[in-house]
Image: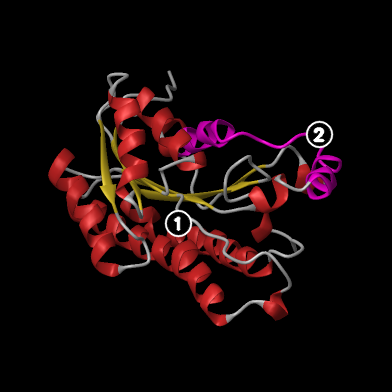
Amino acid sequence: MVEIALRDKVAIVSGASRGIGAAIAEAFAAHHARVVVSSRKIEGVEQVAKALTDKGYMVEAVAAHVGKAEQRAHLVSEAIQRFGKVDILVNCAGTNPFFGPMVSIDEGAYLKTFEINLHGAFELSRAVARHLIDRNSPGSIVNIASVAGLRASPLQGVYGMTKAAMIHMSRSMALELGSSGVRVNSISPGLIETKLAAAITSSEAALESVTSRAPLGRIGQPDEIAGPALFLASDASSYVTGHNLVVDGGLTIV
């Protein structure tokens, strides 16, 4: 019988201080994973970890800026030290510091977007993949991309570039790592009610322009991404790799 469970699995979830990352961490912990929650500032993930440990879950908080090599290494080594191994990585850390035309973005914002959204995820994925290969163990990497990586998104061009690259990265890694039993997939959320999406959700006109085109007629909630992530991390998706799962209320079919 197929069961969506993560018993005896250890997961790292980056960008887990709030929103989608926090929701994924809770879903994993509720399904018996031991979870390391991480973000750039320790205060946010400590709050998440405390809330989850108060429920009886096994969750540890580690601060790490995914754009910094030494902090990425620290995150992986801390997870191994605290729980003995890593089986699952969710790259959820993301940023979108500029909302406007691509011709107007400054170099600093451009580089920051790539540093966090793409380079950090790439290097964390490589580190966890090496760990899994060294252990001769199967594992799952789940990258949180975006529908902005699938089609042109007004005023989010550079953000969309990073997410398009993340989807391609997932497919290429899936091809290379499949023989080692390491699966790599991505999820492309539509508009989800998070702080990252505030530039859209705080504007009545912008929000209407999205929800009016989506068949479900509304924006999504963070826990609606947690379910797909749980599926891709678990053995319920054992024959799924290199896939980009779109979770957007039907937005991209119209």
Which numbered dot is residue 163? Answer: none
Q: What secondary structure do most residues of the magenta stretch adopt?
A: helix
Q: Mark 2 or mark 1, which has the lower sequence index?
A: 1
User: Visible in this render: residue 238?
Assistant: no
Residue 209 lies in the magenta stretch: yes
Which residue was labeled with disc 1?
Answer: 174
Image position of 72 with respect to 60: above or below: below
Q: Residue at x 64, y 63 (%)?
A: 160
For the point 67% across and 64% down, which residue is it? 99
The residue identified by callout 2 is: 217
Question: In this rendering, would 200 be left or right of 135?
Answer: right
Pointer 2 and pointer 1: residues touching (CB < 8 Å)?
A: no
Q: Note whether 33 is above or below 246 in the view shown.
A: above
* Residue 172 in the image, given as x and y percentages of width and height: 48, 64
Tell me: 30 left or right of 36.
right
Q: Return the x and y of residue 155 as percentages of the image width and height.
A: 73, 65
In the rendered image, residue 104, in percent from the top left (x then y), is placed at: 69, 78
Give the answer, above or below, for where 158 lies relative to 145: below
Q: Is residue 3 left or right of residue 192?
A: left
Residue 96: give x, y in percent of width and height. 57, 61
Range drawn in magenta: 204-232
Disc 1 marks which amino acid? Answer: Ala
Mark 2, mark 1: which one is toward the viewer? 2
Q: Secondary structure at mark 2?
A: loop
For image coordinates 31% across by 24% down, the residue present is 32
Q: Secondary structure at mark 1?
A: helix
